[in-house]
């Protein structure tokens, strides 16, 4: 159990560092931490994931220094949504990331009050592409944890 | 007797056929070791070369900045980038200088060529946050060559200049700049990419292409 928590925290930490370091500069329109949270919510829904979501959402909000904890609330909504609908079908698991990314785009666009179709399209495409890449890589690495799901 | 007679010969044959032949022939093991050694050496040298190239580039940038400082008699502080804003919607960076170096909000940030990169937004003891020119909250009054002036505003769709009257004599590729109040140093921002004229609107919408683009490769200087 401790190893699972450590793995989740370690991976989310790496993704958050990716967000801060932006290795692809501003060319790649993506939020790595958000994609990691979708993955763990979907495949490893537990109390430790919820704790990680709360902590990393709070850290992200601190970095952006918004008065409103938008990311923390958004991540919790995604977690609760996933648990509420009890997604265990492969098709549902395929559709869920799409819905999460659309939800994220909507929330952020409304919060910053900017609606730029080209940016939204690029963000969506880049996020989907990277999510499935992360999923492919992480499934192998998280095998002992995800054993019962895969 | 025979043994003593042949003993040195045995030594000779052994030396000739085993030791000497080994020296003459190129053994595969030795070749592999040499290749590996050369590969290591090559890697080391190429790393050193890259380091030297990086240092040369950095040196050139600092020289450029120094010449700007001497020509225009302006004072600026060099800064390194330490991070980006994690949000995909914002374009803000963190620099490694703060109130300990007398940085205050509103100071302009330029690159080594003297082009505007952004404006200091928040200052803490050891770091400051900079709004880049294409951030959604960035705005600054600018001039277009000597013909017009307006409000430059960043955004996800690009950098725009607002409130330019329809009859102003601006054209594509005109340069956009701001002037420091403390000196006669002009900070160039970019050039006009597109001019949008719409019927029924009082003002033009002008799209700007910034001169400073790749934030990774630049040295930053905060103009005091």
Image (cartoon, grey):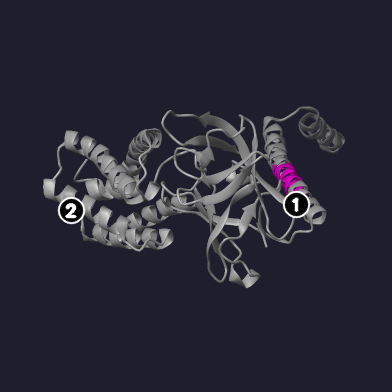
- Specify the quadrant of the image occupied by residue A98: top left
Observer-side mark, 2 or 1, equals 1
In the displayed structure, A13 sits above or below A118; it is: below
Examine the rendering and report whether any part of residue B211 can be seen. Answer: no
Instruction: Specify few, some or many for label 2: CA neighbours under 10 Å numbering under 14, 14-19, or 20 or more.
Output: some
- Residue at 67% x, 37% y is B36
Q: Which residue is mark 1?
A: B65
Q: Is residue B140 left or right of residue A139?
A: right
| Tag 2 and tag 1, C-beta contact below 8 Å | no
Q: Is residue A112 left or right of residue B57?
A: left
| Magenta span: chief secondary structure | helix
**Where does the image place residue B23, in percent across and percent down from the top left?**
80, 32
Mark number displayed over residue A80: 2
State which region is magenta: B47-59
Circle 1 SS class: helix
Q: Is residue B57 magenta?
A: yes
- Residue at 30% x, 50% y is A37
């Amino acid at each position: 159990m401790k190893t699972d928590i450590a793995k989740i925290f370690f991976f989310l930490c790496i993704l958050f560092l990716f967000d801060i370091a932006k290795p692809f500069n501003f060319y790649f329109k993506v939020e790595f931490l958000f994609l990691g949270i979708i993955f763990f919510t979907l495949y490893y829904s537990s109390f430790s994931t919820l704790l990680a979501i709360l902590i990393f959402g709070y850290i992200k909000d601190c970095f952006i220094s918004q008065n409103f904890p938008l990311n923390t609330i958004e991540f919790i909504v995604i977690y609760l949504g996933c648990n509420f609908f009890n997604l265990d079908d492969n098709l549902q698991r395929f559709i869920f990331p799409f819905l999460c990314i659309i939800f994220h785009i909507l929330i952020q666009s409304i919060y910053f009050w900017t609606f730029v179709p080209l940016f939204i399209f690029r963000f969506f495409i880049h996020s989907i592409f990277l999510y499935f890449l992360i999923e492919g890589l992480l499934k192998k690495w998280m095998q002992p944890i995800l054993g019962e799901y895969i | 007797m025979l043994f003593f007679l042949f003993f040195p010969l045995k030594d000779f044959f052994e030396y000739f056929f085993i030791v000497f032949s080994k020296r003459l022939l190129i053994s595969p093991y030795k070749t592999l070791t040499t290749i590996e050694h050369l590969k290591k050496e090559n890697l080391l040298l190429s790393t050193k070369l890259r380091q030297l190239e990086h240092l040369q580039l950095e040196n050139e940038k600092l020289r450029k900045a120094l010449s700007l400082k001497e020509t225009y008699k302006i004072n600026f502080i060099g800064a390194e980038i330490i991070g980006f804003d994690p949000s995909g919607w914002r374009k803000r960076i963190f620099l490694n200088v703060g109130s300990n170096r007398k940085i205050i909000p509103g100071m302009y940030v330029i690159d080594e060529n003297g082009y505007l990169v952004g404006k200091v937004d928040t200052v803490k003891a050891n770091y400051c946050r900079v709004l880049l020119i294409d951030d959604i909250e960035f705005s600054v009054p600018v001039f277009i060559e000597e013909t017009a002036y307006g409000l430059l505003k960043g955004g996800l769709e690009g950098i725009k200049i607002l409130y330019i009257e329809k009859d102003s004599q601006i054209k594509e590729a005109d340069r956009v700049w701001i002037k420091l109040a403390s000196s006669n140093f002009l900070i160039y921002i970019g050039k006009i990419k597109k001019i949008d004229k719409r019927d029924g609107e009082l003002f033009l919408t002008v799209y700007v292409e910034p001169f400073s683009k790749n934030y990774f490769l630049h040295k930053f200087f905060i103009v005091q």
